[in-house]
Image (cartoon, helix red, strand yellow):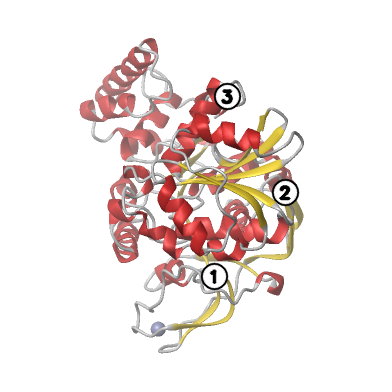
Amino acid sequence: MNPRLALAVTAGKAAGVAVRRMGRGGGTALPGLVAERVDPGLVGHLAGQLARGRVTISGTNGKTTTSRVLASILQAAGAPFVHNREGSNLMRGLASTLLGAASASGAIPGARASYGLFEVDEATLPLAMPHLRPTVLGFTNLFRDQLDRYGEVDTVFSLWREALAKAPRDATLVLNADDPSVAELAVGWSGPVHWYGLDDDAFATVAAGATDARWCRTCGGSYRYDRRYFAHVGIWRCRGCERQRPAPDTEARDVRLSLGDASFEVPGVGALRMGLTGIYNVYNALAAVSIARVLRLPETAIAAGVLAAQPAFGRQEVVDLKGRRLHLLLCKNPAGANQVLLLLASVGGAGLKVATLLNDRFADGQDVSWTWDVDYEVLAGCVGRCWAGGDRAEDMALRLTYARWPRCEAVVHEPAALLDAILAGSAPGEDVFVVPTYTAMLDLRAELVARGAAQPFFETA
Ligand SMILES: [Zn+2]
């Protein structure tokens, strides 16, 4: 027993109890922060006990959903695991999760048979690497995300490169073959790589969308696409050097999307169904399936786990508001927004009712010019009624005018006023699609909770 570790665990747990007594729901960071003060090696000491393997999942979009699908697969396999499920993916959140799993002596019960599953923030990955010492590193994609926070895509890529330089040399990289920026992580990596990708020409698009990977970092050349699915994701090759989309080890084919679910075929695993939809969620599931295969989990558990996976908070949640089905579709950045709009264009039908909510607070990105990188035009002619909400509702409404959407029925800041307008403009039994930025989602959800239509998120998590 390590006395300093035991002291750190005790202090952290005490902080957790104090936070809960004060009624701060979802306070996931403080216990870890306190414990790390006492023992800076805490995360390494605890994570190192998880002997079946430690998985990190990183990427600008989809890491929460990917982690959830993998957790569901581990559950279906009956494999014990520790997971930072509540979504605090910074260092202190990792520490809090591990603390929660440890006994007062600093030992995680059953650790020898357990996995660690860690969703890790882009900028935290280099810091976390020497502590977590992952056996598998999964990466989903690299899009422009929250510009105010990390700057350019190149900054994130450098952070990942820095993380890989600190990663165990025999760890397996699980990489999205269809994203040339993610694929580039394999350049110079001497350990094993497991590739995943999509092979379905039904989803090829000619729309350019927001492209965040215009240049090859190896030679400076531009990419050309034999097939582009969305943004810079597709079957690519570099015009300047030998690099091209690697052949996937795990591949999705015959994708079928509907409003509430999706199915696809993975050779070697079989036909998979899930209660998540959108081509982006097919990629998330495929990342989870690939990691599960690297961990040698049984195919039956993979199929059952994918089927049982639930959408993460605010991502494809359906809320009943006086008989209307409100589909909450969180958009964090241009790429995420484009994918949601493509989904609505392909499966939403005609006469869509859509509310778009734009905030410009820190977590949303304070520069709203990103809305001009979003292809709202794909829904011109499909939208029957629309509403604009959030702190920057007027900017949103203006953007939609340029996209040739009908005039907004309401342009309001307050979530309560928005919901009233939606109720006035829709009938029971109808679907209404709500597309908010992150803090606009939080505000709207708070109003839905106040009206008894939704549960507080820390109770559903
Ligand atoms: Zn190149």
- Residue 144 makes an appearance in the image: yes
Label 2 vs 1, first from the N-terminus: 1
Q: Residue 15 carries which label?
A: none
Give residue 294's quadrant in the image: bottom right
Label 2: few (<14), some (14–19) or many (≥20) C-alpha neighbours in 10 Å: some
Label 1 vs 3, first from the N-terminus: 1
Q: What residue is drawn where x is 49% and y is 33%?
A: 415
Residue 348, position in %: x, y?
A: 71, 54
25 to 346, vertically: above or below: above
Between 260 and 52, the one lying in front of the other is 260
The kind of secondary structure element at disc 2 is loop
Give residue 320's quadrant in the image: top right
Q: Separation of disc 2 and disc 1 at Cα?
A: 23 Å
Q: Separation of disc 2 and disc 3 at Cα?
A: 22 Å
- Mark 2 or mark 3: which is in front? 3
Q: Which mark is residue 178?
A: 1
Which amino acid is tagged 1?
Asp
The kind of secondary structure element at disc 3 is loop
Residue 323, position in %: x, y?
A: 73, 30
Total marks in image:
3
Between 393 and 454, the one lying in front of the other is 393
Q: What residue is drawn where x is 38% and y is 78%?
A: 215
